[in-house]
Amino acid sequence: RGDTGVAEGGRAPAFLPCGWEGTEGLPACPQRAAGGASFSSPSCSLFLHLLLGQERSPVGREGSAEEDSEGELDMMNLPETPETCLQMNLVYQEVLEEKIQEVHVLLAQNKEEQEKLTRELAGPRTTKSSDGKAMPANVFLGHFLKPYFKDKTSGIGPPANSDAQERAMRSIKPFEDLITTKWKSREKLLLRQSVISDHLQHLLQPKLLKLEYLTDKRERSQDEMERQILGKQIQEAECEMNNIKELPEEVLLGNRFDKHDWDKIANVNFEGTRSAKELEKYWQNSEHPSINRKEWSEEEIEKLRELAARHKCLSWETIAQELGTQRTAFQCLQMFQANNKDFKRSEWTPEEDRMLLQLVQEVRVGSHIPFRKIAYYMEGRDSAQLIYRWTKRLDPNLRHGSWTPEEDALLLKAVAKYGEQDWYKIRREVPRRSDIQCRDRYLYALHYDIKKGKWSAEEEKKLIELAEKYGVGKAASSEGLFS
């Protein structure tokens, strides 16, 4: 040790042994700080043997309890010198090193267990066929589902980026969550039967418990009079259960907002094909028999507009209740949007055309274009408008301009094959022409009823008279006058 008070190993004293906490300027023993009040710890005992010059094996504790007790008494009389503190510090550092090694061993064991569990979850190892080729591994379906990039051990995906955080903060759902599978007739029937069964079980459950209790009590009773009374109560309970089972279906269907065990219905009745939330929403907004599905009257639509304006187009549940015609909130919102011209645009702008072109290039898969997904990104446009605009105007494969004789021949052949109505099939026979183009070309140029050739003087005179009468651009109004 030099004048700086540091031991030869370069490690300064950190704390004092138990019982020396009162020494001014020096920290207390960690064992006493943690609540320990005894001198029987291995580190303190080891320190005692080292300071007193006694031989002691560093592994295990040898000797009797009397020796440990004597050592503790000797420790109380240790000299309060810097050398003692340095030796105590070295001993505790050795103890900490041992604990760190133990932690490393436990971590290694934990990692080995994690790898073992990962191998078990991944299924059996890839087997080889007779020709030596590797057989396909047993990979779970979850490996191919979102999130696509997962932690190998936990299966957790990456943290949300700034865009995902902003969408979550604004309660904007991803498009995948908005996609719904069309309901089939058997699913609707199953939903109705499941609701009836769940309501029936809810009514019968307390009666069954009561019946079980009365039956058990009667079996344990020794009094004949009491047994007769209990028997009568059992008969009444059974009669109540029979009455519940005979309730009409309309009563068992209950109110639209009655609580049901949707989780059980989703997992047991539907075997996980529909989620509990999906079943609940569809039942309350579409399938309950109390929902009014009749055509909307003009008075009803006018009242809906007034209520929507009064509530500032918010709280559609309240609007549906005040409307008082057994309409759901979704029906009210849907009808309001359908009758509001501000929500559906008619004229297309160049910006919208460019946006539609870009979205089609981004999301199309081969010849399939998911117009429902594109409509999610184009405000004020539905999928039907997008399909019409793309197939009739923006599709780069469409040919515009004059028809060639070859195209006319293909069109006439297709009309002879499919008739004058099925223009969607006809367009497949005429490359790069839309169904509207095919229809207009046939009806206004190629139809056998159309008179062809040079116009006569009488026809030109009559055309001028009709144009003056109906105005230029009103050819459809005067078309029948030429027949």
Image: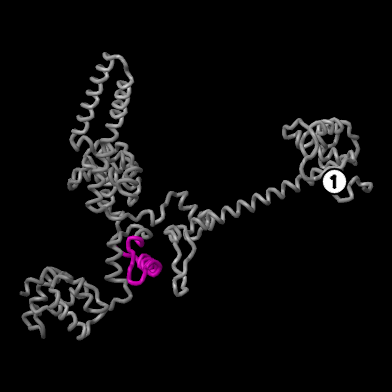
Give the quarter of the image for residue 214: top left
Q: Main secondary structure of the magenta part?
A: helix
Query: Considering depth in this image, is 273 or 113 the residue closer to the camera?
Result: 113
Q: Residue furthest right?
A: 3
Give the quarter of the image for residue 175: bottom left
Q: Is residue 291 left or right of residue 279?
A: left
Which percent across, then down, holds residue 56?
84, 42
Q: How many marks?
A: 1
Q: Residue at x 84, y 48 (%)?
A: 11
Relative to 247, does residue 338 appear above or below in the rendering? below
User: Is residue 371 a member of the stretch shown in magenta?
Assistant: yes
Identify the element where label 1 is drawn: loop
- Residue interval drawn in magenta: 347-374
Q: Residue at x 27, y 43 (%)?
A: 194
Which percent across, then down, holds residue 359?
38, 66
User: Is residue 11 a member of the stretch shown in magenta?
Assistant: no
Q: Which residue is mark 1?
A: 12
Q: Is residue 121 visible?
A: yes
Q: Is residue 159 left or right of residue 393?
A: right
Which percent across, then down, holds residue 103?
68, 48
